[in-house]
Image (tube, rainbow, N blue to C red):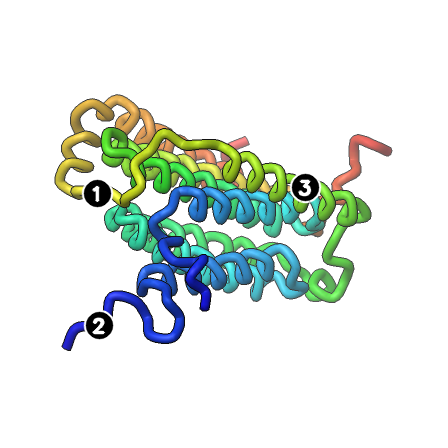
Amino acid sequence: MLSALDGMAQSLDAYLVLAGILFAIGSFGFLARRNAISMLMSIELMLNAVNLSIIAFGAFSTSLVVEASVIALIVMAAAAAEATVGLAIVIAIYRNRKTPLVDEYDAMRQ
Amino acid sequence: MTLPETIPFLGIGWDDLLFMTLAGVMLISGLLVVTMRNIIRCALAMIVCFAALAGLYVIASAPFVAAAEVLVYIGAISVLVLFAIMLTQTKAAPSRLVFQTQAGPAAVAGILLAIVITLAVVSTDWPVSNTLNPTDTRSVAETLFGSFVLPFEVVSVLLLAAVIGGVFLAKKEHGGID
């Protein structure tokens, strides 16, 4: 029973498929949500999916195992900077338009 | 007392069970992040998703990245998101429509993206070893402050610029600076 799943944590494919599905979930959220903060949270999910794939590649490679951790840390710092600026922009727009919903930001269409 | 090599009656290893549990938690909470109606619950589900992801980093033998994930994402970015939610939500917002009109095509695109990535990953023969290599935190530090010292410094300047820019953008406009 379930023996086909044996060794799942030791295979690169499992990690990469997981990261791909998380990236797809994040892209769906970015395209479909109306709230600007939900869209930023979806971007965070996508960045985390990419980080997971970087760590997985590093963990299964003998020569890149250290570099993968370093690159993942730098990606995390870039994601933190992106979240700071993005949320500040959302708050600044909210102060002008009184709504966090992106489909009501239509000042350039009128 | 030592645990047996594989779990009795299931025939899978303990790390496989842990991997599947964390993967399930991560995917379900990730789906909840993009589908739930109340945005505060979305942010809390995002915290659960990041915690499961930190556990996956531990299984992938990258403990320092797992600790950084907990500190940066659960500790900092989630709090930032919750504060932004507190500052921007009106009372009418959660009860109104969650998705845009393009949600259907977006769902199709997301499912197609997942299928394409899965097929590409499974059909590729990756030239990697078949065992996990543990990450030595000491060598991570030596690489970060050795050959990666220039990106490290650039990222620190980027973070400083982001903090100043965030304060400037979120500042009230009649506060002085034009």
Residue carrying label 2: B3
Residue in view at x 36 percent, y 36 percent: A57
| First along the sequence among labels 3 and 1 | 3
Alpha carbon distance from label 2 to label 1: 25 Å
Do circles 2 and 3 both sit on a common chain? Answer: yes
Q: Give the total of numbered labels.
A: 3
Alpha carbon distance from label 2 to label 3: 41 Å
- The amino acid type of the residue labelled 1 equals Thr
**Front residue (pair B43, B109):** B109
Label 1 crowd bin: few (<14), some (14–19), many (20+), radius 10 Å: many
Q: Mark 3 falls on what kind of element?
A: helix
On the rendered structure, is A108 left or right of B31?
Answer: right
Do circles 3 and 1 both sit on a common chain? Answer: yes
Residue carrying label 1: B135
- The amino acid type of the residue labelled 3 equals Leu
Q: Position of residue B108 (x, y in %)?
A: 73, 45
Q: Name the image quarter holding residue B74.
A: bottom left
- The amino acid type of the residue labelled 2 equals Leu
Q: Position of residue B151 (x, y in %)?
A: 30, 25
- The answer to whether B91 is drawn above or below residue A98 in the figure is below
| First along the sequence among labels 2 and 3 | 2
Pick the quarter of the image with the C terminus of chain A. Answer: top right
Alpha carbon distance from label 3 to label 1: 34 Å
**Front residue (pair A28, A98):** A28
Residue in view at x 31 percent, y 65 percent: B14
The label number, if any, that marks residue B112 in the structure image:
3
Whether residue B174 is visible:
no
Residue in view at x 30 percent, y 32 percent: B156
On the rendered structure, is B100 left or right of B85?
Answer: right
On the rendered structure, is A71 left or right of A101?
Answer: left
